[in-house]
């Protein structure tokens, strides 16, 4: 499964950067490839839904959001640290 996690748009609406999370993480490259293959269709559908409320539909750029993966990796590192208990 995948979900948009963040969207950043330029003030002039020339481009929208869409970050998405993918689970399982191993499918990220395939999902990114599929989104890029369908980019013009996604933009067209977006225009159909919001085209009357804005003048310009931005170009779309998709990126994998690896925040959850990085957090998990950091948790693993912390859990494997050999930190002696604090002496009182």
Image: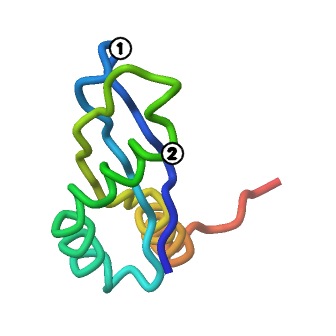
SS at badge 1: loop
39 is higher (above) or lower (below) than 23:
above
Q: Name the residue furthest top.
A: 12
Left/right of residue 87 with respect to residue 59 in the rendered view: right
Residue drawn at point x = 44 percent, y = 85 percent:
24
Left or right, residue 22 beside residue 14: right
| Quarter of the rendering containing residue 73 | bottom left
Above or below, comparing residue 12 to residue 38 in the picture: above
Secondary element under disc 2, as helix, strand or loop, is helix
Classify 10 Å Cα crowding around label 1: few (below 14), some (14-19), many (20 and above).
few
Nearest to N terminus: mark 2 or mark 1 = 1
Residue identified by numbered label 2: 49
Q: Residue 19 location in percent, x, y?
A: 38, 51
Q: Quadrant of residue 65?
A: bottom left
* Front position in the image: 40 or 68: 40
Say which residue label 1 marks. Answer: 11
- Give x and y (percent) for residue 47: 39, 42
Q: CA distance from mark 2 to mark 1?
A: 20 Å
Near-viewer residue (4 or 38): 38
Q: Position of residue 58 (x, y in %)?
A: 29, 33
87 over 15 or under it: above or below: below
The number of discs equals 2
Q: Nearer the viewer, mark 2 or mark 1?
A: 2
Residue 34, x across and y down, in percent: 23, 75
Residue found at x 44% / y 40%: 7
Q: Is residue 60 above or below residue 36?
A: above
């Amino acid at each position: 499964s995948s979900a948009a996690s963040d969207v950043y748009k330029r003030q002039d609406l020339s481009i929208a950067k869409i970050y998405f999370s993918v689970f399982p993480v191993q499918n990220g490259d395939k999902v990114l490839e599929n989104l890029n293959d369908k980019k013009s269709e996604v933009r067209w559908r977006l225009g159909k839904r919001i085209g009357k409320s804005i003048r310009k539909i931005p170009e779309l750029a998709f990126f994998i959001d690896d925040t959850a993966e990085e957090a998990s990796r950091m948790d693993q590192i912390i859990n494997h640290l050999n930190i002696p208990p604090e002496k009182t």
